Image (tube, rainbow, N blue to C red):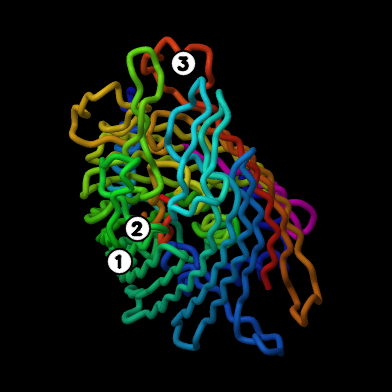
Amino acid sequence: MLPRERQSTPATARLQLLAASCALLGSASSRAQEANAAPTESGVLQDWSVDSALAYYHEDGRVLAIEPIVNVSKVYPHGQLLNLNATFDSLSGSSPNGALTSRVAQTFASPSGKPAHAYTTAPGELPVDPHYSDTRIAFGGSWTTPFTRVDQVTVGAKLSDEHDFFSATVDASIAHDFNEKNTTLSFGVNDEFDSLSPIGGAPVPGSDYALADKTGGKTKDGVGALLGVTQVMTRTWLSEFNLSVDRFKGYLNDPYKITSIVDSAGNTTGYVYENRPDQRTRKSAYWENRVTWNSPISTALSLRYMSDDWGVRSDTAQLHLRWTMANRDRYIEPTIRWYRQTAADFYTPYLMGGDKPMTGYESSDSRLGPFHALTFGLKYAQKLAGVAGRSNSEFSVRAEFYKQTFDESAPTPGALQGLDLYPALEAVLVQVGWRF
Amino acid sequence: MNCKPMRLLLLLSAAIIAGGCSSLGVKPWQRDVLARDEMRLDANPLDAAIDDHLYFSKEASSGGRSFAGGGCGCN
């Protein structure tokens, strides 16, 4: 599968030796070992590698987000790697509140309770809160250090702050190479603490929306573990397999989601706040394969299966195909991703009359419902020489289209027949990136 | 929904990797292709981070490739 010229010329042989040297230093056999060589150019960030991106995300008729993100890393003489990153999110637009579409106009109070922010949804329209707005700033860092020739440890931390949410996470992992560094076994744990301070307070789960029975802030925390093995299969095939589990406890509701109560004819008679269990355990298996088929074409195929004790089962398959052109100074990368999930046991698009939920819990949050989604993407990257004092940098632009289609099979009450109760979600993402 | 094919495929992959570790792999001088950027498991970390954030906020699943925590109040 290798191009003939890469095996025949002295220049190519030198490149292969250089690549092999990099690999011997640990750059190829595992995610944990993927350290960059320190750049040698002069300047403020002379010893740092910088990766940056600006993303624009827009849902059709709903949320709009702008997200700049920057990641800097530095390799120290003894192989240690320091990585720091910062992210900023600005979101605005409309967000579904969980209520069901109705034949008549529906009026909702804002989470804050301010009369000026009350909103009315037209007949036949999906209820969305049009005043959704938030900003998020997040910082993260990690430190990786080898402690034997074949072992290394990584510790990291992440802080994220929003107007109504704060999150702190710490993690640690260890990786061990064997079989001539063709196999890497890794194990990591993380601990996350979240603090919620919803606008207007946190609703009492399952309480009547009209009573606005709310309390102060809430918390949730989670722990997770990940066991992974990375294997060099052949000269052109790298495989990774991960098993992970995490468990969250605390206030796991979305404080802004409500569920409609409808009568047997399909008329909405009221609303209740959603009521999710206060614990959730998720397990997942993940398999990724990277294969170079010939000189210009390589693929990355990943499969994931996830299940949780809320009854959600999901399958994910994603394929990246990279076509490298010219003297490896540019490439295009089409992507396709397919995803499907079953509904949580307590998911219901509405509650019928005064019936209590069978499970004791209820949520009409569509993200816990049954749906499938497709993503199509395309990326173009171009290497640039001599920009910002660097001998080499890379500019990239990519676009993605995401469509989520609901697979709800619940019976539709008479008055709601003919309405689009589960409209598809369509979104576009455009991103520009620069690394040097 | 029948998710057995995906589970079987993932179990098969684990068996291949676990059973084949000792007989698979390359010599150090055969890592030229493996050292290419596109063969890195985190070849595009920012793309992955932005996508993960999108999917975390729109779907019930997250993680797998790395830890599943979101650090975001969007879900």
- Mark 2 or 1, closer to the camera: 2
Q: Quadrant of residue A305?
A: top left
Image position of A2 with respect to A424: above or below = below
> Label 3 crowding class (10 Å Cα cut-off): few <14, some 14-19, many 20+?
some
As drawn, the label of residue A416 is 3
Which range is magenta?
A317-332
Task: Please identify the quadrant where the N terminus of chain A is shown.
Answer: top right
Instruction: Name which residue lies at 53% across and 33% down.
Output: A404
The mark found on residue A201 in the picture is 2
Query: Which amino acid type is shown beneath numbered disc 1?
Result: Phe
Across and down, in percent, residue A399 comes to 68, 47
Magenta stretch prevailing secondary structure: strand
Check if mark 2 and mark 1 are on a common chain: yes
Q: Of A2 and A391, which appears nearest the observer? A: A391
Between discs 1 and 3, the one toward the N terminus: 1
Residue A296 visible to an observer of this rendering: no
